[in-house]
Amino acid sequence: MTTAPFRPAATVRPGDNVAVIAPASGFERPPFELGLKVLAERYRPTYSEEIFTKHRYLAGDDGRRLTELLAALADPAARAVFCARGGYGATRLLTKLVNMPPPGARKLLVGFSDITALHLWLQAHGWVSIHGPVLTQLGRLGAATHGRLFALLESPVPAAPLEGTDTYVGGSAEGRLVGGNLSMLSRVIGTPYMPVLEDTILLLEDQGERPYRIDRMWTHLAMAGVFARVRGIVLGDFTQCEEKDAPYSSADLLRELAAATGLPCAAGFPIGHGERNEPVPLGVRVRLDADGRRLTFLEGAVGG
Protein backbone atom coordinates (compact mmCIF):
# COMPACT_ATOMS: atom_id res chain seq x y z
CA MET A 1 0.00 0.00 0.00
CA THR A 2 1.39 3.40 -0.96
CA THR A 3 0.63 6.60 0.89
CA ALA A 4 -0.61 9.78 -0.77
CA PRO A 5 0.80 13.15 0.32
CA PHE A 6 -0.66 14.28 3.62
CA ARG A 7 -2.75 17.42 3.79
CA PRO A 8 -4.74 18.78 6.75
CA ALA A 9 -8.50 18.45 7.06
CA ALA A 10 -11.09 21.19 7.05
CA THR A 11 -11.56 23.17 10.25
CA VAL A 12 -14.57 22.43 12.45
CA ARG A 13 -16.31 25.34 14.16
CA PRO A 14 -18.66 25.41 17.15
CA GLY A 15 -22.20 24.83 15.97
CA ASP A 16 -21.15 22.87 12.88
CA ASN A 17 -22.88 19.66 11.87
CA VAL A 18 -20.90 16.51 12.67
CA ALA A 19 -21.84 12.95 11.75
CA VAL A 20 -22.03 10.07 14.24
CA ILE A 21 -21.61 6.56 12.84
CA ALA A 22 -21.32 2.99 14.14
CA PRO A 23 -18.84 1.16 11.88
CA ALA A 24 -17.89 -1.58 14.35
CA SER A 25 -19.57 -3.24 17.37
CA GLY A 26 -23.05 -2.68 18.69
CA PHE A 27 -23.35 -0.67 21.89
CA GLU A 28 -25.60 0.22 24.80
CA ARG A 29 -27.51 3.50 24.69
CA PRO A 30 -26.69 5.00 28.15
CA PRO A 31 -22.94 5.58 27.55
CA PHE A 32 -23.68 6.64 23.99
CA GLU A 33 -26.17 9.24 25.21
CA LEU A 34 -23.61 10.60 27.71
CA GLY A 35 -21.06 11.04 24.96
CA LEU A 36 -23.64 12.54 22.62
CA LYS A 37 -24.48 15.12 25.28
CA VAL A 38 -20.84 16.24 25.45
CA LEU A 39 -20.68 16.50 21.67
CA ALA A 40 -23.99 18.38 21.45
CA GLU A 41 -22.72 21.06 23.81
CA ARG A 42 -20.24 22.07 21.11
CA TYR A 43 -21.55 20.87 17.75
CA ARG A 44 -24.73 19.63 16.07
CA PRO A 45 -24.39 15.83 15.93
CA THR A 46 -26.54 13.97 13.42
CA TYR A 47 -27.09 10.23 13.09
CA SER A 48 -29.54 7.66 11.81
CA GLU A 49 -31.53 5.47 14.14
CA GLU A 50 -30.00 2.57 12.22
CA ILE A 51 -26.80 2.93 14.25
CA PHE A 52 -28.65 1.08 17.03
CA THR A 53 -29.09 -1.93 14.75
CA LYS A 54 -27.64 -5.19 16.08
CA HIS A 55 -26.32 -8.04 13.93
CA ARG A 56 -24.75 -10.55 16.27
CA TYR A 57 -21.86 -8.54 17.81
CA LEU A 58 -21.93 -5.84 15.13
CA ALA A 59 -23.85 -2.58 14.73
CA GLY A 60 -25.68 -3.97 11.73
CA ASP A 61 -24.36 -5.95 8.79
CA ASP A 62 -21.35 -4.92 6.74
CA GLY A 63 -23.46 -3.28 4.04
CA ARG A 64 -25.25 -1.04 6.51
CA ARG A 65 -22.07 0.04 8.26
CA LEU A 66 -20.14 0.61 5.02
CA THR A 67 -22.93 2.67 3.48
CA GLU A 68 -23.18 4.79 6.61
CA LEU A 69 -19.41 5.41 6.72
CA LEU A 70 -19.15 6.47 3.08
CA ALA A 71 -22.26 8.65 3.30
CA ALA A 72 -20.88 10.49 6.35
CA LEU A 73 -17.54 11.12 4.67
CA ALA A 74 -19.22 12.31 1.47
CA ASP A 75 -21.77 14.56 3.21
CA PRO A 76 -20.70 18.19 2.62
CA ALA A 77 -22.78 19.31 5.62
CA ALA A 78 -20.82 17.10 8.06
CA ARG A 79 -17.58 18.74 9.13
CA ALA A 80 -16.25 15.74 11.07
CA VAL A 81 -17.18 12.10 11.72
CA PHE A 82 -17.36 10.55 15.19
CA CYS A 83 -17.50 6.81 15.82
CA ALA A 84 -19.92 5.47 18.42
CA ARG A 85 -17.79 2.52 19.52
CA GLY A 86 -14.81 0.36 18.56
CA GLY A 87 -14.89 -3.29 19.55
CA TYR A 88 -14.87 -5.22 16.28
CA GLY A 89 -16.23 -4.73 12.81
CA ALA A 90 -14.36 -1.87 11.13
CA THR A 91 -11.71 -4.37 10.06
CA ARG A 92 -14.34 -6.23 8.05
CA LEU A 93 -14.87 -3.12 5.91
CA LEU A 94 -11.27 -2.94 4.69
CA THR A 95 -11.79 -5.36 1.82
CA LYS A 96 -14.42 -2.99 0.44
CA LEU A 97 -12.30 0.11 1.01
CA VAL A 98 -8.73 -0.72 0.05
CA ASN A 99 -8.88 0.55 -3.55
CA MET A 100 -11.45 3.24 -2.83
CA PRO A 101 -10.33 6.78 -1.97
CA PRO A 102 -12.36 8.44 0.78
CA PRO A 103 -15.28 10.31 -0.77
CA GLY A 104 -15.81 14.03 -0.34
CA ALA A 105 -13.61 16.77 1.02
CA ARG A 106 -11.09 15.96 3.75
CA LYS A 107 -12.58 15.84 7.22
CA LEU A 108 -11.47 14.36 10.53
CA LEU A 109 -12.69 10.95 11.63
CA VAL A 110 -12.48 10.37 15.39
CA GLY A 111 -12.20 6.98 17.10
CA PHE A 112 -9.79 4.35 18.41
CA SER A 113 -9.42 0.62 19.13
CA ASP A 114 -10.95 -1.28 16.19
CA ILE A 115 -11.35 2.09 14.40
CA THR A 116 -7.58 1.78 13.82
CA ALA A 117 -8.60 -0.07 10.62
CA LEU A 118 -10.26 3.07 9.26
CA HIS A 119 -7.32 5.24 10.31
CA LEU A 120 -4.99 3.00 8.25
CA TRP A 121 -7.26 3.32 5.21
CA LEU A 122 -7.45 7.11 5.54
CA GLN A 123 -3.69 7.45 6.01
CA ALA A 124 -3.06 5.42 2.86
CA HIS A 125 -4.87 8.21 1.03
CA GLY A 126 -3.04 11.04 2.80
CA TRP A 127 -5.82 11.92 5.25
CA VAL A 128 -5.11 13.01 8.81
CA SER A 129 -7.46 11.49 11.39
CA ILE A 130 -7.90 11.56 15.16
CA HIS A 131 -7.04 8.64 17.41
CA GLY A 132 -9.40 9.63 20.19
CA PRO A 133 -12.49 8.81 22.23
CA VAL A 134 -15.52 7.07 20.77
CA LEU A 135 -18.87 8.35 21.99
CA THR A 136 -19.43 5.49 24.43
CA GLN A 137 -16.19 6.54 26.16
CA LEU A 138 -16.38 10.31 25.73
CA GLY A 139 -18.96 10.94 28.45
CA ARG A 140 -16.78 9.50 31.24
CA LEU A 141 -13.67 11.47 30.29
CA GLY A 142 -12.73 14.79 31.85
CA ALA A 143 -13.22 18.33 30.60
CA ALA A 144 -9.52 18.71 29.79
CA THR A 145 -9.69 15.77 27.36
CA HIS A 146 -12.83 17.21 25.78
CA GLY A 147 -11.04 20.53 25.38
CA ARG A 148 -8.04 18.91 23.73
CA LEU A 149 -10.33 17.13 21.27
CA PHE A 150 -12.18 20.32 20.37
CA ALA A 151 -8.88 22.17 19.90
CA LEU A 152 -7.62 19.48 17.50
CA LEU A 153 -10.78 19.82 15.46
CA GLU A 154 -10.92 23.60 15.43
CA SER A 155 -7.36 24.99 15.42
CA PRO A 156 -4.51 24.68 12.90
CA VAL A 157 -2.06 25.06 15.80
CA PRO A 158 -0.24 21.78 16.62
CA ALA A 159 -1.66 19.85 19.57
CA ALA A 160 -0.11 20.40 22.97
CA PRO A 161 2.70 17.91 23.74
CA LEU A 162 1.92 14.78 25.74
CA GLU A 163 4.00 13.38 28.57
CA GLY A 164 4.66 9.71 29.20
CA THR A 165 5.81 8.10 32.43
CA ASP A 166 8.73 5.81 31.47
CA THR A 167 11.70 5.63 29.14
CA TYR A 168 12.15 2.11 27.80
CA VAL A 169 14.85 2.96 25.24
CA GLY A 170 16.55 6.35 25.19
CA GLY A 171 17.00 8.58 22.18
CA SER A 172 14.84 10.74 19.92
CA ALA A 173 13.15 10.36 16.56
CA GLU A 174 10.89 12.27 14.20
CA GLY A 175 8.29 11.07 11.70
CA ARG A 176 4.58 10.80 10.97
CA LEU A 177 2.51 9.27 13.75
CA VAL A 178 0.84 5.99 12.71
CA GLY A 179 -0.70 2.99 14.43
CA GLY A 180 -3.13 2.62 17.28
CA ASN A 181 -4.41 -0.69 18.58
CA LEU A 182 -1.76 -3.43 18.70
CA SER A 183 -4.24 -6.27 18.17
CA MET A 184 -5.74 -4.60 15.10
CA LEU A 185 -2.40 -3.61 13.61
CA SER A 186 -1.02 -7.13 14.01
CA ARG A 187 -3.96 -8.49 11.98
CA VAL A 188 -3.12 -6.47 8.86
CA ILE A 189 0.49 -7.66 8.55
CA GLY A 190 0.93 -9.55 5.29
CA THR A 191 -2.20 -8.02 3.77
CA PRO A 192 -2.58 -5.20 1.23
CA TYR A 193 -3.83 -2.97 4.05
CA MET A 194 -0.55 -2.60 5.95
CA PRO A 195 0.45 1.08 5.83
CA VAL A 196 3.78 2.44 4.68
CA LEU A 197 5.93 2.58 7.82
CA GLU A 198 9.07 4.35 6.62
CA ASP A 199 9.52 7.80 8.19
CA THR A 200 7.01 7.05 10.96
CA ILE A 201 6.66 6.92 14.72
CA LEU A 202 4.58 3.91 15.77
CA LEU A 203 1.83 4.31 18.38
CA LEU A 204 0.64 1.15 20.16
CA GLU A 205 -2.01 0.57 22.85
CA ASP A 206 -4.33 -2.27 23.85
CA GLN A 207 -6.74 -3.65 26.41
CA GLY A 208 -7.48 -7.03 27.91
CA GLU A 209 -4.56 -8.86 26.31
CA ARG A 210 -2.57 -11.16 28.60
CA PRO A 211 1.22 -10.73 28.46
CA TYR A 212 1.86 -13.82 26.35
CA ARG A 213 -0.60 -12.53 23.75
CA ILE A 214 1.11 -9.12 23.70
CA ASP A 215 4.42 -10.96 23.28
CA ARG A 216 3.02 -13.00 20.37
CA MET A 217 1.60 -9.97 18.54
CA TRP A 218 4.75 -7.90 19.11
CA THR A 219 6.92 -10.77 17.88
CA HIS A 220 4.73 -11.00 14.78
CA LEU A 221 5.40 -7.32 14.11
CA ALA A 222 9.12 -7.89 14.59
CA MET A 223 9.26 -10.89 12.24
CA ALA A 224 7.36 -8.89 9.62
CA GLY A 225 10.02 -6.18 9.69
CA VAL A 226 7.90 -3.47 11.30
CA PHE A 227 10.55 -2.38 13.79
CA ALA A 228 13.18 -2.29 11.05
CA ARG A 229 11.15 0.37 9.27
CA VAL A 230 9.75 2.71 11.92
CA ARG A 231 11.89 5.31 13.70
CA GLY A 232 10.49 5.21 17.22
CA ILE A 233 7.76 3.73 19.43
CA VAL A 234 5.13 5.48 21.57
CA LEU A 235 3.33 3.21 24.02
CA GLY A 236 -0.08 4.25 25.31
CA ASP A 237 -2.19 2.47 27.88
CA PHE A 238 -2.15 -1.31 28.15
CA THR A 239 -5.11 -1.75 30.47
CA GLN A 240 -6.30 -5.00 32.04
CA CYS A 241 -3.26 -6.75 30.58
CA GLU A 242 -1.88 -8.38 33.73
CA GLU A 243 -1.48 -12.08 34.40
CA LYS A 244 -3.10 -13.00 37.71
CA ASP A 245 -0.56 -13.75 40.46
CA ALA A 246 2.35 -13.46 38.02
CA PRO A 247 5.71 -12.18 39.36
CA TYR A 248 5.97 -9.85 36.36
CA SER A 249 3.84 -7.12 34.80
CA SER A 250 2.88 -6.27 31.25
CA ALA A 251 5.14 -3.24 31.62
CA ASP A 252 8.09 -5.55 32.37
CA LEU A 253 7.36 -7.43 29.17
CA LEU A 254 6.94 -4.31 27.05
CA ARG A 255 10.19 -2.85 28.37
CA GLU A 256 12.02 -6.03 27.35
CA LEU A 257 10.40 -6.17 23.93
CA ALA A 258 11.12 -2.49 23.27
CA ALA A 259 14.75 -2.89 24.28
CA ALA A 260 15.17 -5.63 21.68
CA THR A 261 14.18 -3.22 18.89
CA GLY A 262 16.82 -0.65 19.82
CA LEU A 263 14.40 2.10 18.83
CA PRO A 264 13.70 5.17 20.98
CA CYS A 265 10.67 4.18 23.05
CA ALA A 266 8.72 5.94 25.79
CA ALA A 267 5.72 4.47 27.58
CA GLY A 268 2.84 5.50 29.78
CA PHE A 269 1.25 8.04 27.46
CA PRO A 270 -2.43 8.60 28.34
CA ILE A 271 -3.69 7.24 25.02
CA GLY A 272 -6.12 4.35 24.62
CA HIS A 273 -8.47 2.47 26.94
CA GLY A 274 -7.37 4.12 30.19
CA GLU A 275 -8.86 6.87 32.30
CA ARG A 276 -7.91 9.73 29.96
CA ASN A 277 -7.45 8.70 26.31
CA GLU A 278 -6.03 11.99 25.13
CA PRO A 279 -6.79 12.47 21.43
CA VAL A 280 -3.84 12.65 19.03
CA PRO A 281 -3.73 13.35 15.29
CA LEU A 282 -2.50 10.47 13.14
CA GLY A 283 -0.63 11.34 9.96
CA VAL A 284 1.00 14.51 11.29
CA ARG A 285 4.72 14.83 11.98
CA VAL A 286 5.77 14.36 15.58
CA ARG A 287 9.00 14.34 17.56
CA LEU A 288 9.54 11.68 20.21
CA ASP A 289 12.00 12.51 22.99
CA ALA A 290 12.16 9.16 24.73
CA ASP A 291 14.62 10.37 27.39
CA GLY A 292 12.29 13.22 28.27
CA ARG A 293 9.20 10.99 27.86
CA ARG A 294 7.66 13.65 25.63
CA LEU A 295 5.71 13.53 22.35
CA THR A 296 5.66 16.84 20.47
CA PHE A 297 3.32 17.51 17.57
CA LEU A 298 4.88 19.50 14.74
CA GLU A 299 1.77 20.01 12.57
CA GLY A 300 -1.89 20.72 13.14
CA ALA A 301 -4.65 18.36 12.08
CA VAL A 302 -6.72 21.04 10.31
CA GLY A 303 -5.96 23.84 7.91
CA GLY A 304 -6.00 27.50 8.76
Image (cartoon, grey):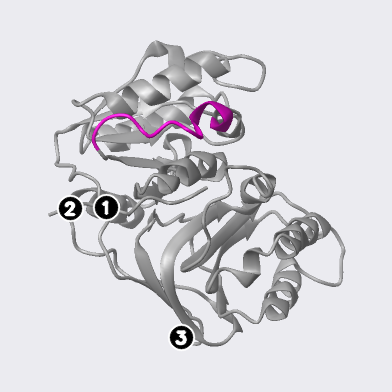
Amino acid type at circle 2 is Gly
Amino acid type at circle 3 is Gly
Q: Earlier in the sequence, mark 3 or mark 2?
A: 3
Q: Which residue occupies 38% across, 24% down?
A: 70
Look at mark 3 in the image and give the residue it sits on: 292
How many numbered circles are shown? 3
Looking at the image, which is closer to me, 202 or 225? 225
User: How far apart, in angstroms, are the residues tagged by discs 3 and 1?
Assistant: 29 Å
Is the stretch drawn in magenta largely helix, strand or loop?
Answer: loop
* Above or below, comparing residue 190 to residue 167 in the picture: above
Residue 274 seen anywhere in this rendered image of the structure = no
Question: Disc 1 or disc 2, which is closer to the eye?
Answer: 1
Q: Is disc 1 placed on a helix, strand or loop?
A: loop
Look at mark 2 in the image and give the residue it sits on: 303
Tell me, yes or no, whether the two marked residues, 1 and 2, touch with CB atoms within 8 Å. yes
Magenta-drawn stretch contains 185 = no
Q: Earlier in the sequence, mark 1 or mark 2?
A: 1
Residue 19 lies, in percent from the top left, at: 30, 27
- Residue 7: mark: 1
Q: Earlier in the sequence, mark 3 or mark 1?
A: 1
